[in-house]
Amino acid sequence: MPIIRVAELFAGVGGFRLGLEGCAEWQEEPSGPYRTVWANQWEPPGTPAKQFAWRCYEERFGAGSCVNENISVVMDEALAGEREVPDFDLLVGGFPCQDYSVARPLRQSGGIEGKKGVLWWDIERMLELKRPRWALFENVDRLLKSPGSQRGRDFAIILSCLARLGYSVEWRVVNAADYGMPQRRRRVFIWCERDTRPWDLRERLTGGLMADAFPAECSDVTACSVPLDPYETSETFGLGLRTSPFLSAGAMQGGRVLSARPAPTYDGPRTVLGDVLVDDTEVPASFFIAAEKLPAWEAARAAKHIPRVSRAGVPYVYSEGAMAWPDPRDRPSRTILTSEGGAAASRTKHAVRGSSGRIRRLVPDELDRLQMFPRGWTDAGMTDQQRAFCMGNALVVGCVRRIGEALAKRA
């Protein structure tokens, strides 16, 4: 099997690399066709105290394995010929959901100019510079719907950029728990190929790489198109729409788009929150919730209907539904957020009844495992709160593994 060279942007603690190169056990050498040849991780504003994810990456993959510099500066230097980025076959990265609006038309000298500080444009520049055969990106699923004023515009801009560069695209919103993983986490995975052959977009919905990785039955198939000029897309796409035309599965080539609603058909093994929990004898005392603090935690989970007034002076009722208390051990967990760390009562943090019967927060080793990293992966000189933050930012490694396996069969 040929080696597939990988470059990893916004690498965090290495979730993409683990998913592609294998992470079932601690290992010194990759076991499959994937080899990461270049990676970048940098947390603004660039102070040493903020670079704990990068230090973890280097601890696990070796000194010099990841460039700890602002990717915008790296790309400026690479495009000016002042820095060398090695050739690679597959570009991967999980980038923030931001405002992707385009500030300057493609027809003007200098080409596209995106909003300053928006990291998508560094991905776009890397694709234009290196022209890899494939790319794989991960983002929150609201990317398909944003912004509210132009439904679907942001994702349409991304599709326009990819089409302009000669990439055809598949995407799939995946809830990891639907495919046997221990966390209910919905994220969109965007698969890109430099493929000059005409695509049957309907076949791609049911027989493409994403369909191989995440089997599903697709319904409500709809068609639309995106302009090949990202500036035109930025100015016009989604105007007047109440809902986005992009559903949870889709394919695009040359600006033509088919989109559908996928219903997972996975029937394999499943794991739940209880499968990743450690025994209470391994849990530090600070993670147990004192009896006098339990009412505050329960109140945070209770249903709420609170009268409020908007900035415009309009009265409304803020509502939240009730949440299970404590978190059920026999189901996949709720989504881990970056706010998971810390002892203060919270609606979003997890709390379980441990093996001793006492209610406690999740320890960092359990958070690692809910994201399907090896236990102790983030135990690399970080505080407990930093470890929780990294897992709130991470992806479910098992999702990347499924995509990597599907590509390896086709490459």
Image (cartoon, grey):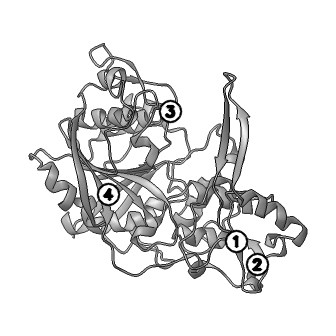
| Residue at x 32%, y 27% (from the top left corner) | 237
Q: Position of residue 134 (x, y in %)?
A: 27, 51
User: Mark 2 vs mark 4: which is more N-terminal?
Assistant: 4
Q: Which residue is disc 1 drawn over? A: 326
Q: Judge left or right: residue 59 versus residue 382.
A: left
- Mark 2 to mark 4: distance in Å? 40 Å
Considering every residue shown, the one lying at the far top of the view is 108
Kind of residue sitting beneath label 3: Val
The crowding category of the residue bearing disc 1, from other C-alpha atoms within 10 Å (few below 14, some 14 to 19, many at least 20), is: some
User: Mark 3 vs mark 1: which is more N-terminal?
Assistant: 3
For the N terminus, the quadrant is bottom left
Kind of residue sitting beneath label 2: Val
Kind of residue sitting beneath label 1: Pro
Q: Judge left or right: residue 285 versus residue 13.
A: right
User: In this rendering, is residue 121 above or below 103?
Assistant: below
Q: Which residue is disc 4 drawn over? A: 5
Residue depth check, mark 2 versus mark 4: number of the one nearer the observer: 2
Q: Which residue is disc 3 drawn over? A: 73
For the C terminus, the quadrant is bottom left
Q: Which residue is disc 2 drawn over? A: 283
Quick check: marks 3 and 1 in contact, CB under 8 Å?
no
